[in-house]
Amino acid sequence: MTDPDLRTLLDDPAEVLRHDRAELRARIDALPEEQGGVGREVFTQAEAVFGSAPVTSAEFASWLHFAATVLGHREYAERVAAAEPGLPWRTVWAWWRPVGAHEAAPNLSGDRSAEVYEAGGTPLLKVWALWCEDAWFDLATGRRRPAPAEGTAEPYEEDEPDGPWLFDADDASWALRGPDGWEEPIPLDGGRYVFLDARGVAVVERNDTALADWPTGGADSSGPAPTDGGPWFRPGTRNTDGPLTAARLDGVFGPSGMLRVPAAELPAALTHAPTRELLTEAGLPRRWAAGITSFAVAAELLGPGPEGLLHVGEFDLGYCDPGEVFVHPGTGAVGLRQPDGSHGPGGDAVFPLVRDLESFVRFLEGVRRHMGVCWDPYPGEEGVKTFLRAMTEVDAGALTDGAPGAGVWEHLFASITELGVDGY
């Protein structure tokens, strides 16, 4: 069914805050999947993070403001704050994985830290994690910054705030609903805090005027009450179903982590046009790792291999012999040779691994993209099922029981479907 007035309503935060949430939720759930705009994204994301429990309009405004900021809808966030100046807290900036989004970064699973520094008079935030490159941010704006020169950054002295902390469970603190996992923030000047968990980092600011008369009793940090519909994104905006592009792969592996070969430098023996285009335009990850398994591009990419194949790189499969990856120059099919036979016939035989090099890259990218949702899903997210379903759509034949390379992919995929962030 269609609801011609709903999109206009949802795209106006002042109207959203005046309406009953349960009624809006029911109308949203009845919409076709392809219908909606920014307002639908923000509303469903707010409830996916915080749940469907009833709260005041002012507190729900804080949820909407957070969701809009996480999704990058800054103008909508500003309109939320203008519509409800009494919201108890607002999000200054956030680098955060939205619920339902399968993105490579931020992935702060496992060990992680956030530290505040000052360099050249500018406060900076450094975020470190096992599976995430060091990231530096302007603390005031959230803009990414290059790392300061060695020896120029001084640690920021934390200032213990007077009175209760935001989202403290102590009875003297305000009765607010906090996101799951928001614990032990870094307090900053001006009533601001840095919150860090496996899904990202956020700087939030309390509204002292609104909180002056706010009920106390401590924050509720229990998991969110689930909603029926779940988060929704405008079709085509999350960049996970489209073609492989240089920008997409740079976003997953980093520009320096990608290898692209000018067409003139590709060997003449490689006649498979889609493979040539992939290597020239989208590229191949130089190195990939997950758990105890890793892949590295060959020192001589596309050098001669057995049976007229071209050498692509090597897998270190962990606890067994490495596997050499080859591509057929005419068909683009990708094969593997593993001498000890742990995942194939063994010896010098090269056995089929995956349909083509594009599917090979998509499998590697898929593991990286889904790491966070597999290791640290939000309540209601089914990260492993979603990942395996997405990989089946890439090349179901390569993963079928009895397929020559199925054991290899099962071993690689287990890094995020069965093993933890530390590889155990």
Image (spheres, grey):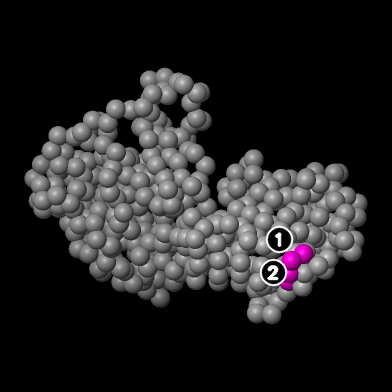
What secondary structure predominates along the stretch shown in magenta?
A: loop
Q: Does residue 32 lie above or below 244 as drawn?
A: below
Structural distance between the alpha carbons of marks 2 and 1: 8 Å
Closest to the observer: 333 or 16? 333
Which residue is identified by label 1?
Answer: 321
Which residue is identified by label 2?
Answer: 342
In magenta segment, residue 334: no
On screen, residue 180 versus residue 219, left or right, reads right
Q: Earlier in the sequence, mark 2 or mark 1?
A: 1
Q: Residue at x 76, y 59 (%)?
A: 325
Q: Residue at x 48, y 56 (%)?
A: 421
What is the secondary structure assignment of the residue under circle 2?
Answer: loop
* Labelled pair 2, 1 in contact (Cβ < 8 Å): yes
Q: Residue at x 50, y 71 (%)?
A: 385
Q: Does residue 251 lie above or below 376 as drawn?
A: above
Q: Which of the 4 image quarters holds residue 177?
A: bottom left
In magenta segment, residue 342: yes
Task: Say whether residue 42 is visible.
Answer: yes
- Which amino acid lies under the numbered mark 1 shown in the image of this protein? Asp
Magenta region, residue range: 339-344
Residue 248: where, in percent of width, then height? 61, 51
